[in-house]
């Protein structure tokens, strides 16, 4: 199994390396659509070719019958758009035009993809020799060799995360780190019903929900997916990402602003997950003063955090649960009436739990964030679970931290994500014991005494430090003696630096 994983990761990295070659003088946001578009085109072609071969082998002459493909949720690829045509043209000057034409033809044959696929491969800034090399790479590696049909989905996700890293701040538009998405999904457990993300980016919440269902032997047909995003490029990426994972979703008729053009006005969702833009200002509050969604108070014009939260509460079904990522300011802010809105939501007993996350989880921002979990059918009425996870996670690069999944050891020790999810399960069952410095179950009365401030650190306290058994007097004698030695060394070094500077004519 491990060997197979290595092969797959190797393939993902190989594609990324090719993407980097192709980049040339294009910036990350431009070449993203080129690379992801190619991965998607290859995915469509592979699925089509496999079915095409099956129909040829059956020998009934139905291999060009579109219904034979669409009935199995496979996109129909017309003759001139097939990968064989693209790979033959790989090293001609027309390769860009051939790919653009293929995208147009596929859109024409498949309504679901209308206006979604990128058609910018013929532009002069894209080096056609490099483009041909990437086409070769796709042609030469057979996806099925890796024993995993999901390899292109995995590659799409891997490239998304690398583009997020390359784009830095701008990437917040389309990418939420996988470990944060997994944490939301593992706590909410979306087995069946309607799943909604009002700021869906490239669709990561939906992909992770499907993986969760598969991992727990559920049926992915038991959930239906709804989303929306205002950025046209991101909205198209989400369609491709979901199609590549075999997920049918309703992302609205077009990209649109969730506050002003709600694409799902009557939706009542059973699970809502979102990572909306942090602290969004100028979101149009003045034009939405009497909106039906502001049940707990009118959100301030300078910050949309509680507008997002109330939009989501408005769309919750009577048994609905939601999890969202919010900047830590929302836990304690009193600005522009935010304190009153938070107080009203707490009094309505909707908040199930708050998780303070560690820093450096995002490519895009250093802002400390928390996860809010709300539930219309709380089992622990009148109580809120606080989790302080700020010390969790492992630095995977100099700048980036990740919450661990299962530890890859023989005993399958629990990782950070599972620990948080299990803490919520125990809370739900009423068996959770408070753990100083990590978690606490707090009554609404106690939250009221804290002026409705929801910062977990206030409630969980500080973990006890282990006593090392060394008496205080002895420890202080030892430490002051070590410090005295270090001071002595620093004076020696200072003298040496003065001497060296003097020898080249400088005196200090």
Image (cartoon, grey):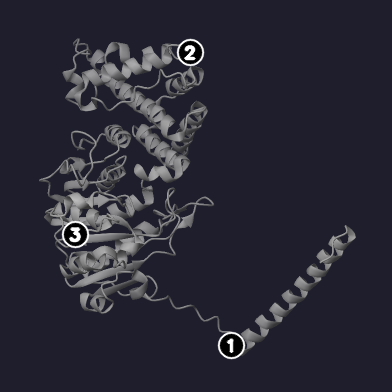
Q: Is residue 260 visible?
A: yes
Q: Earlier in the sequence, mark 2 or mark 3?
A: 2
The answer to which of marks 3 and 1 sits earlier in the sequence is 3
For marks 2 and 3, give the CA distance: 59 Å
The image's mark for residue 50 is none
Query: Between residues 384 and 3, which one lies in front from this camera angle?
Result: 384
User: Residue at point 26% right, 55% down?
Assistant: 301
**Residue at image mark 1:** 472
Q: Are marks 3 and 1 in contact (CB under 8 Å)?
A: no
User: Which residue was labeled with disc 3?
Assistant: 298
Query: Badge 2 is on which residue?
Result: 91
Q: Taking the image as drawn, is residue 435 in sight?
A: no
The answer for how far apart the CA atoms under marks 1 and 2 are is: 76 Å
Q: Where 216 sits versus 18, above or below?
A: below
Instruction: Give the label, 1 or 2, closer to the camera.
Output: 2
- Count neighbours of disc 3 (C-alpha within 10 A) and say few if under 14, some if 14 to 19, many if 20 or more: many
């Amino acid at each position: 199994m491990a060997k197979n994983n290595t092969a797959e990761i190797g393939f993902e990295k190989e594609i990324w390396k090719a993407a980097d070659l192709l980049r040339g003088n294009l910036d990350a946001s431009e070449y993203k659509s080129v690379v992801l578009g190619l991965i998607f085109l290859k995915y469509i072609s592979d699925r089509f070719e496999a079915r095409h071969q099956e129909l040829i082998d059956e020998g009934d002459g139905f291999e060009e019958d579109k219904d034979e493909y669409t009935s199995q949720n496979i996109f129909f690829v017309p003759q001139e758009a097939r990968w064989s045509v693209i790979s033959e043209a790989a090293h001609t000057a027309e390769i860009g035009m051939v790919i653009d034409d293929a995208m147009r033809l596929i859109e024409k044959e498949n309504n679901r993809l209308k206006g979604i696929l990128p058609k910018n491969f013929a532009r002069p800034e894209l080096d056609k020799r490099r483009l041909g090399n990437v086409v070769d790479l796709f042609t030469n590696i057979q996806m099925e060799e890796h024993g995993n049909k999901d390899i292109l989905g995995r590659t799409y996700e891997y490239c998304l995360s690398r583009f997020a890293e390359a784009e830095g701040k701008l990437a917040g538009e389309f990418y939420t780190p996988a470990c944060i998405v997994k944490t939301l999904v593992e706590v909410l457990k979306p087995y069946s019903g309607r799943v909604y993300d009002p700021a869906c980016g490239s669709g990561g919440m939906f992909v992770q929900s499907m993986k969760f269902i598969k991992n727990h032997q559920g049926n992915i047909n038991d959930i239906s997916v709804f989303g929306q995003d205002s950025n046209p490029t991101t909205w198209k990426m989400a369609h491709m990402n979901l199609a590549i994972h075999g997920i049918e979703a309703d992302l609205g008729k077009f990209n649109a602003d969730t506050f002003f053009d709600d694409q799902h006005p009557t939706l009542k969702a059973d699970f809502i997950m979102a990572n909306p833009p942090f602290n969004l200002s100028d979101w149009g509050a003045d034009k939405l003063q009497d909106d039906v969604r502001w049940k707990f108070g009118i959100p301030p014009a300078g910050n949309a955090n509680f507008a997002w939260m109330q939009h989501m509460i408005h769309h919750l079904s009577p048994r609905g649960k939601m999890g969202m990522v919010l900047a830590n300011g929302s836990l304690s802010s009193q600005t522009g009436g935010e304190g009153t809105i938070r107080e009203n939501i707490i009094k309505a007993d909707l908040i199930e739990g708050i998780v303070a996350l560690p820093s450096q989880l995002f490519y895009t921002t250093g802002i400390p964030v928390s996860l809010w979990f709300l539930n219309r059918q709380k089992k622990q009425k009148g109580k809120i679970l606080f989790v302080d996870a700020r010390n969790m996670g492992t630095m995977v690069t100099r700048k980036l931290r990740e919450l661990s999944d299962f530890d890859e050891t023989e005993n399958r020790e629990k990782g950070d994500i599972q620990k948080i999810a299990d803490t919520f399960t125990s809370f739900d069952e009423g068996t959770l014991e408070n753990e100083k410095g990590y978690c606490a179950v707090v009554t609404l009365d106690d939250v009221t005494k804290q002026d409705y401030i929801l910062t977990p650190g206030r409630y969980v306290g500080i973990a006890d430090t282990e006593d090392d058994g060394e008496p205080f007097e002895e420890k202080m004698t030892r430490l002051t003696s070590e410090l005295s030695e270090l001071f002595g060394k620093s004076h020696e070094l200072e003298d040496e630096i003065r001497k060296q500077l003097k020898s080249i004519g400088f005196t200090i």
